[in-house]
Amino acid sequence: MKMIRINGETREFSTGVALFQDFLGGLNEELKQSNQVIASVKVDGKELSAEEETLLSEIAIDQVGEIEILTASPLDLAYETLNTLDQYVELLMGSVAQAADYYKKKNLISGDTYLAKAIDGLDLFVQTIGGVKLAIRVGLNPKIALIEATLVSIVQDLLETKRQSNYVFLAELLEKDLAENLSEWKTIAFPIFRNYRIS
């Protein structure tokens, strides 16, 4: 048996030869019944990163130190994610501005580096927004749909313009179209998400 703290309450779990990943998988299944998910996992007082969790996955649960778990509803996590997305968009806008600046100065190697960072960042951003939309159940909101469609179109234009090596237009797309779209996420889309309530 192993004592594990979940949301501050100590519970006893039968360990047997269960692996850490099996324990988390079983707990996730149990939490689904109450519409909760694991929000964070601490071992010996330290919150685990995704990489650290993977490293522990094949370790027997009784070989892992003191475990503490916090749960949350997907909706709570979505609103928490929205708060961090503001900062994330700021960082993205920094990479976008750097890429545009380097392309305008014909420093193509540095421009390509920052463009690659921006594209990777945008990919993660789109995935995260998809998760937020599902959790909040915002449905089809015309303003959000337009901003989202515009972002997809801009990314396609960026990739096509890069393939054509048209760096003047690429810089313009970055510093005008993409910067404006990212700004719309912050000023229009995020407030819609924050004000949305499931009826």
Image (cartoon, rainbow, N blue to C red):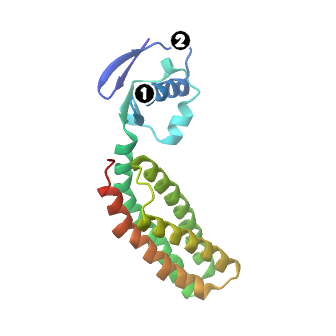
Where in the figure is residue 122, as x and y percent of width and height? 52, 64
Query: Which label lies toward us, 2 or 1?
Result: 1
> What residue is rendered at 62% in x and 72% in y?
156
Where in the figure is residue 39, as x and y percent of width and height? 40, 38
- Please say if 164 is above or below 28: below
Q: How far apart are marks 2 and 1 (CA)?
A: 24 Å
The answer to which image quadrant residue 47 occupies is top left
Q: Which mark is residue 16?
A: 2
Judge the density around disc 1: few (<14), some (14-19), many (≥20) Cα neighbours within 10 Å: few
Q: Which amino acid is tagged 1?
A: Gln
> What residue is rendered at 51% in x and 35% in y?
53
Where in the figure is residue 42, as x and y percent of width and height? 40, 33
> What residue is rendered at 45% in x and 76% in y?
179
Tell which of 154 and 119 is nearer to you.
154
- Say left or right for 25 vs 75: right
**Helix, strand or loop status at disc 2:** loop
Tell which of 190 and 49 is nearer to you.
190
- Say left or right for 98 vs 136: right
Residue ranking furthest to the front: 199
Q: Which amino acid is tagged 2?
A: Gly
Where in the figure is residue 159, as x and y percent of width and height? 64, 73
> What residue is rendered at 48% in x and 23% in y?
64
**Helix, strand or loop status at disc 1:** loop
Residue topped by disc 1:
33
